[in-house]
Amino acid sequence: MQQMTQIMANLQAASSSEASRPPALKTPSMKAPECFDGTQPFKVRCFIQSCQFLFHNDLANFSPDRKKVLYATSFLIGRAEKWIEPHLSNLTNQDQN
């Protein structure tokens, strides 16, 4: 009987400590970067900074660096997209080896 009382006391202590624990914080969602087409090179800094904010905000989903590259590449259009295409072929070929 004493053992049962001890078990009940342990369970109550565990549940009260969980109740006093603050809720886990959710990672806030952030705006995706605007597409970059390469026609205005001075905008590349803003594009990269937007991507970096997102990466730092959600480290778990953007590791390894390959995920960062693929994500940022998905926002390249026009001239910038044409420029990155051969590099993406190299990246995907590495995955197959």
Image: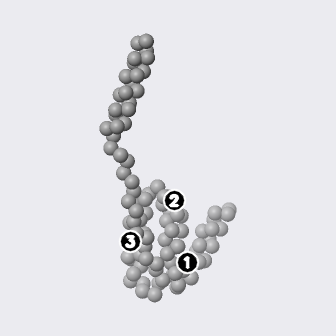
C-alpha separation, residue under disc 2 versus residue under disc 3: 18 Å
Q: Residue 57, located in which quarter of the rendered image?
A: bottom left
Where is residue 22 shown, x and y percent of the image? 33, 44
**Are there few (<14), some (14-19), or many (20+) residues within 10 Å of tag 1?**
few
Q: Residue furthest top?
A: 1
Q: Secondary structure at mark 2?
A: loop
Mark 1 vs 3, N-terminal side: 3
Identity of the residue drawn at 43% across and 12% down: 1
Front in this rendered view, residue 51 or 42: 51
70, above or below 86, in the image: above
Where is residue 48 shown, x and y percent of the image? 42, 73
Q: Which amino acid type is marked by label 3?
A: Gln
Q: Which amino acid type is marked by label 1?
A: Ile
Query: Which residue is disc 3 drawn over?
Result: 49
Q: Residue 8, located in which quarter of the rendered image?
A: top left
Front in this rendered view, residue 44 or 11: 11
Judge from the rendering whether residue 14 lies leftward or rightward of residue 70; answer left or right.
left
Disc sitting over residue 84 in the figure: 1
